[in-house]
Amino acid sequence: MAGETAQGTAPQRSGRTASHLVRYEPATATIQDAERKDISSREDILTLVETFYTRAFADDLIGRIFTDVVHMDLPRHMPIMADFWQTVLFKAGLYSRNALKIHFDVHAREPLTLEHFNRWLQVWTNTVDELFSGEKAEMAKVQAHLIAGSLHRRVTGRPASQYSTISLRPDAAG
């Protein structure tokens, strides 16, 4: 139904970004957080992306995009995604593919909806929170929200920036 989330409940309008993706809310620290370490190595990133994609493949909403639409070869894809997240989190410079073009290609085969992006973010955020706690773990969630918002806006024909509707003030000298 229009206006409902995949779980069947009406979404809250407050707390949404300009693209209507679920807004990132920093996790509140718990006692369990001290038991989890932060993301600090490629091995940690591999654990994160392998766990995430295993869950995403099994997800009722987004799983078929990976399995039936893209026919993703998970073992081949893991080093690519590790390169991506290592570049995002540690500025490693390992990822050089065009993620936007890849998502445009997927969107042409199967429209990627707001619900798809929100579910991806839900699975990603839950996976990060279950495995890690710390500055890089928070950064992984923040960056995922920024990236998903930009990708969603671009594949649906809008500018990448969530601030694209803000006009510039005229030059004071002019």
Image: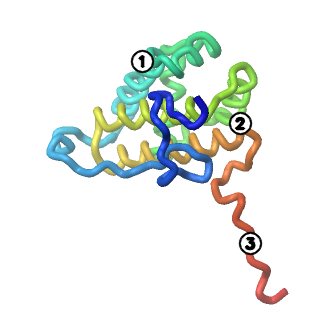
Where is residue 125 shown, x and y percent of the image? Answer: 40, 37
Which residue sits at x=42%, y=48%?
139
Amino acid carrying mark 1 in the image: Thr
Asked if the residue at tag 1 contacts the one at tag 2, i.e. Cβ–Cβ closer than 8 Å, the answer is no
Q: Are marks 1 and 3 in contact (CB under 8 Å)?
A: no
Per the image, label 1 sits on a secondary structure element best described as helix
Q: Amino acid at mark 3?
A: Leu
Q: Which residue is denoted by mark 1 in the rendering?
A: 54
Query: Which of the two residues, 69 or 116, is positioned nearer the viewer here?
Result: 116
Q: Residue furthest bottom?
A: 173
How far is disc 3 from disc 2 in space, using C-alphas?
Answer: 25 Å
Q: Nearer the viewer, mark 2 or mark 1?
A: 2
Kind of element beneath mark 2:
helix
In this orientation, which residue lies closer to the viewer: 103 or 15? Answer: 15
Neighbours of disc 1 within 10 Å: few (<14), some (14-19), many (20+): few
Q: Quadrant of the N terminus?
A: top right
Residue 38, given in percent of the width and then of the height, sits at: 29, 43
Q: Earlier in the sequence, mark 2 or mark 1?
A: 1
Sooner in the amino-acid sequence: mark 1 or mark 3:
1
List the residue tagged with mark 3.
168
Of badges 1 and 3, the one in the foreground is 3
**Residue drawn where x is 35% and y is 44% of the image:** 137
Q: Which residue does the numbered mark 2 point to in the structure image? A: 155
Q: How many angstroms separate mark 2 from mark 1 (CA)?
A: 25 Å
Task: Tell me the quarter of the picture where residue 99 sits.
Answer: top right
The x and y percentages for residue 85 are 48, 37
Q: Residue at x 17, y 45 (%)?
A: 34
Q: Is residue 53 left or right of residue 70?
A: left
Kind of residue at badge 2: Val
Farthest residue, direction right: 174
